[in-house]
Structures are given as C-alpha cells and as structure tokens.
Image: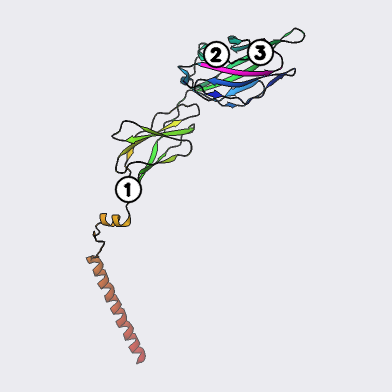
C-alpha cells in the first residue's frame, strides 16, 4: 500500500530558546491537511478511519533546535504508546487508540501528545509537550440524483443534484451490453459532457459523491441514453417527407380555399373603390 504524507507547515514551541516541531505525519494512504496550527497544537483535516484496515500505522516525524533531548514519547490519555531516544520517525498503531476510545459511527477526534524530555544546565528534568488532534469522518455523503441526460453526436451531457459535503463527483458509465465501467472524476460543477462515445449505442450512467475524507456515497440510480449523429438540413428534410432529388411541392386544399377567398375580398374592395370614384366625378 502506498504511503501518502501529511506535511505540516508548522509553528514551533519555544522553551528557553529551544524549539520542537512536528514536520511530517504519515498515515495509511491518505494525505491529511493541517488546519488551525498553533505553537502547541496541530490539527489534521478529516480522514476516513476505514481506509486503514490493512495498515494502521501512523508515523510522526519531528525536529528540534536546541538541547539534545533524552527521550521522546507519544501518549494517549496519559498512557505511553510509543517511545524513542533519537530523532527518528516515531510510530503508533491506530488500534492502540481505538482499543480504549471506540470509533464513533459518524465522526470524531482523538489526541496524541508528543512529549520530549531533557536535562537542563542545572540538572533538572524538563519536558516539552506538543498536542496533535486527529479528526476522522466515516459518514458517507448523500447519494446524488442525475436530473438531466442530453445525448449529442458521440457524446452525452449529464447534470446531477448538488450534495452539500461533496468535494468531487465520480461518473461511471458503459455500454449497456458491456461489463466493464469507465470512470470520470469531476472536481467542480454539477454537469459534465462525456465524449468519444459510439453513436447509436445505448449507454448507462451513474454518479457517486466523494467528500474530503474520501467517503463515498452509494451510486445514483442508473439512467440510459443513446448518442446520435446530428442531422444536417437535407437529412432532416428527407426524414420529414422530402424528395430524394431535393425537389419540393406544395399542395394544401385548405390553403387554396383561403387564397380564393382573399382574392374575392380584394375584388369587392376594388369594385367599391371604383364606385366611390364615379360618384365623386358626378
């Protein structure tokens, strides 16, 4: 399993001119962003704890500027869960945390303390503590709904409903007769045109919502449609009864009756005009 990194751009804790900083955290295959860092507290963005069923090791890398620390410990609820004596990544197993603090059904946090100890110039034992807050989220987003499917020439445009906590959407599609899905991730917007499709072949489409912790919604209901070539004017003309030669005729009895009626009205008008002119001349 690939190990992805959370790199903390950190503020350091300073004690009598010395500083201790967390510089890197590895946890499973998820990159965790940091937010709201203070000199003594570091918070991770939310991650899905279910992603770490195979690899539950978390590695914390740290640095210091000052004396030679004698011991570095990780503590959870005041219980030591790891210890090293040199500046090397210090690790702990997530199960050691959740054995005493059960996973919530939706989301939550746990705190890990990094404690560094050293002897000062007068022989006193001095300790420095940094607090790391890990936020986890196991809630699946709401399932999106495909609201519109518009077929085009070798393409289909999908539109779907907005999901509040979604960071991106994943479209899965395939020909109805195929067994292997193709996927397209959409990071912004609520509409996407899928291109390079085969005209006159029926396709099925589904959309899944993904949040920032990589939780996935269930797939939307399947909708189907068929890309079709766009007709030019002549093709449209032939499909609607036009002659192959391109000739056209017009024969409509009701229209002819209307034309005869209009001619009669015009003749009556001309006759009345001539009569009025004759009276004036008299």
Left of 72 or right of it: where is 201? left
Mark 3, Cα crowd under 10 Å, few <14 / some 14-19 / many 20+, is many
Color style of the picture: rainbow
For mark 1, give the secondary structure. Answer: loop
Left of 249 or right of it: where is 169? right
For mark 2, give the secondary structure. Answer: strand
Front-lying residue, 258 or 93: 93
Mark 1, Cα crowd under 10 Å, few <14 / some 14-19 / many 20+, is few
Q: Position of residue 227 (x, y in %)?
A: 33, 43
The residue lying at 58 percent from left, 20 percent from top is 133
**Which residue position is annotated with label 3?**
116
Instruction: Work out whether 176 lies above or below 199.
Output: above
Q: Position of residue 71 (x, y in %)?
A: 65, 10
Instruction: Work out whether 17 lies above or below 261.
Output: above
Q: How far apart are marks 3 and 2 (CA)?
A: 16 Å
Please say whether residue 158 is one of the residues in the magenta stretch: no
Q: Distance between the residues labelled 3 and 1?
A: 70 Å
| Residue 236, image quadrant | bottom left
Marks 3 and 2 in Cβ contact (< 8 Å) = no
Q: Give the range drawn in magenta.
A: 57-71
Please say whether residue 60 is one of the residues in the magenta stretch: yes
User: What number is the disc on residue 92?
Assistant: 2
State which tag comes first along the sequence, 3 or 2: 2
**Which residue position is annotated with label 1?**
229
State which tag comes first along the sequence, 3 or 1: 3
The residue lying at 62 percent from left, 18 percent from top is 62
| Residue 85, image quadrant | top right
Marks 2 and 1 in Cβ contact (< 8 Å) = no
């Amino acid at each position: 399993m690939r190990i992805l990194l959370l790199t903390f751009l950190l503020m350091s804790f300073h004690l009598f001119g010395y500083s201790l900083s967390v510089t890197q955290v590895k946890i499973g295959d998820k990159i965790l962003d940091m937010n709201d860092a203070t000199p003594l507290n570091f918070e991770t963005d939310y991650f899905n704890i279910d992603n770490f069923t195979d690899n539950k090791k978390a590695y914390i890398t740290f640095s210091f500027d000052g004396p030679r620390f004698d011991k570095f410990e990780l503590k959870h609820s005041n219980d030591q869960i790891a210890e090293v004596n040199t500046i090397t990544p210090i690790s702990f197993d997530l199960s050691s945390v959740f054995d005493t603090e059960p996973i919530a059904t939706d989301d939550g946090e746990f705190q890990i303390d990094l404690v560094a100890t050293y002897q000062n110039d007068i022989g006193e034992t001095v300790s420095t503590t940094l607090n790391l807050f890990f936020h986890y989220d196991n809630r699946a987003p709401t399932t999106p709904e495909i609201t519109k499917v518009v077929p085009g020439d070798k393409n289909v445009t999908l539109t779907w409903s907005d999901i509040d906590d979604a960071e991106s959407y994943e479209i899965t599609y395939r020909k109805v007769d195929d067994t292997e899905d193709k996927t397209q991730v959409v990071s912004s917007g609520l509409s996407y045109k899928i291109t390079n499709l085969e005209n006159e072949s029926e396709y099925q489409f589904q959309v899944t919502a993904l949040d920032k912790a990589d939780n996935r919604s269930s797939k939307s209901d399947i909708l189907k449609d068929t890309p079709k070539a766009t007709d030019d004017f002549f093709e449209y003309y032939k499909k609607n009864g036009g002659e192959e030669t391109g000739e056209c005729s017009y024969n409509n009895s009701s229209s002819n009756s209307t034309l005869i009626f209009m001619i009669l009205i015009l003749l009556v008008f001309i006759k009345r005009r001539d009569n009025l002119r004759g009276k004036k001349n008299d």
